Amino acid sequence: MNLRSILILLLCILPIISFSQLNRKEKKIVKSVDKHEAEALELLTKAVNINSGTMNFQGVREVGKLFQKELDKLGFETKLTSGEAFGRAGHLVATHKGKPGLKLLLIGHLDTVFELDSPFQTSTKVNDSVMKAPGVADMKGGDVIIILAMQALKEAGVLDNMSVEIVMTGDEEKSGSPLDLSKKDLIDAAKWADVALGFENGDGNPETIVVARRGSAGWKLEVTGNAAHSSQVFSEKVGTGAIYETSRILNEFYQQLSKEENLTFNPGFILGGTSVDLKEDETGGTAFGKTNVVAEKAVVKGDIRAVSLEQLEMAKKLMNNIVSENYPGTNAKLTFDPGGYPPLGLTDGNTELLEYYSQISQKLGYGIVYPVNPRNAGAADISFTAGHVDMAVDGLGLSGADDHTVNETGNINKLGVQAKRAALLMYRLSEMKKFKE
């Protein structure tokens, strides 16, 4: 027998060997996923062909109703909440009350970045394994995996051994305001739960999950100087002007903070001159100036991303110190937006979940699972569980590529893989003594 034949044989028998290592209930879970995987793909196809750009409230709610119907069949108590108070479509919240024991929060979202004016509206099959579709990976695939996993746990007779709350938000891609109302259902569920599992795509690699996510917050730098003829710049009376001071501050941000691991701070746009008019929503504006006039005003808007609250506070303190050391004749003020996405810091509980998940993956014959580098994991709804649950991971959804672009794809052959891994994780957690006490 040649090497190629041996490898093919090993690939065929490994799943059989792995399956034999599962207990009776775990085998039932796996068989249920296999049984319903084709139906799950049909559900995913329906979902991605409904436009649910965040601001298309009707479409977001239509997707919510589609998933609500499936969860109703499984005995969940479901509701579509109103988002009127925070200017969005609202959320799908589903609850299952099991025996006293493990309390699970499962997180998805209904909306996508593709609004009604996007050219990307329908799905196509690239091949038997890949679907190109709006939101297939981010994150309707993850929503379907939640439903497929719940179905498997119910059919295996183990769903009643745990209590589950599912929150699929309608504004993950473009959060409503105020944020405390937009994320209230999610935060309330996190305060109740023992474990939070997010079904985002992660970094697109099915061999990874997210144990730490960076938070995201906005900042605004406002600088003033003395308007004067350019011939007087650098004089004691005039000083340097607003634009020089702004360039000093931004350069010092870079010099003093750019080497900090997992921290980024990006100036998104800058306006400067004799006058500056910022748009009401602060997404841009206009500036006027002349080459022979020292700039009187400058405004910069940007974001900052940190992997922990401690890192974020350190960066804010250092940035404020830099801003306070003004060039002659200038003043500057730095403000940080309230709210924003908090960081999901790395905890012992998150690491423990990764270990359990990786062990399950290996038992199933799918290999070791590794943590995603926080630099490759943007802000997500799982971050709002930080400080409320001791164990939280994300990235359990459908792997894919090119999220947020018209080339977004999902690896549909991983629907069953991800559902099996997630369902077995939930089952094994429910059997742990610490959650039964």
Image (cartoon, helix red, strand yellow):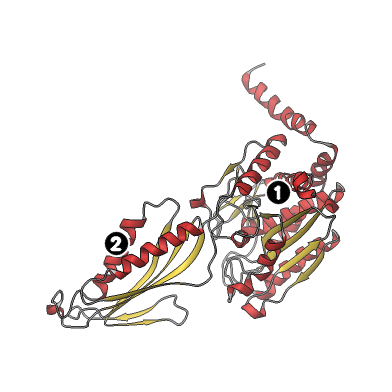
Between the C-alphas of marks 1 and 2, the distance is 46 Å
Q: Nearer the viewer, residue 145 or 373?
A: 373
Residue 352 in the image, given as x and y percentages of width and height = 64, 44
Rendering coords of residue 220 (x, y %):
40, 72
The residue pinned by badge 1 equals 415
Q: Is residue 294 left or right of residue 341?
A: left
- Point out the image quarter for the N terminus: top right
Residue at (84%, 48%) from the top-left corner? 158
Question: Image check: 353 left or right of 299?
Answer: right
Against 328, residue 31 (above or below) is above
The amino acid at mark 2 is Asn
Mark 1 and mark 2 in contact? Answer it, CB < 8 Å. Answer: no
Measured from the top left, where is residue 214 in percent x and y?
51, 57
Q: Earlier in the sequence, mark 1 or mark 2?
A: 2
Q: Residue at x 52, y 60 (%)?
A: 215
SS at mark 1 in the image: helix
In the image: residue 280, left or right of residue 234? right
Residue 230, relative to residue 421: is it above or below?
below
| Residue 261 percent location from the top left of the image | 42, 50
Q: Amino acid at mark 1?
A: Leu
What residue sits 42% from the left and 59% below the top?
A: 314
Q: Is 430 or 408 nearer to us in this picture?
A: 430
Q: How many marks?
A: 2
Left/right placement of residue 104 relative to residue 2 reads right
Crowd tier of the residue under label 2, counting other residues whose Cα lies within 10 Å: few below 14, some 14–19, many 20 or above: few
Q: Badge 1, how many Cα within 10 Å: few under 14, some, many 20+?
A: many
Q: In this orientation, which residue lies closer to the viewer: 101 or 89?
A: 101
**Residue that extends furthest to the top in the rendered view of this protein:** 1
Quarter assignment of residue 89: bottom right
- Name the residue tied to disc 2: 251
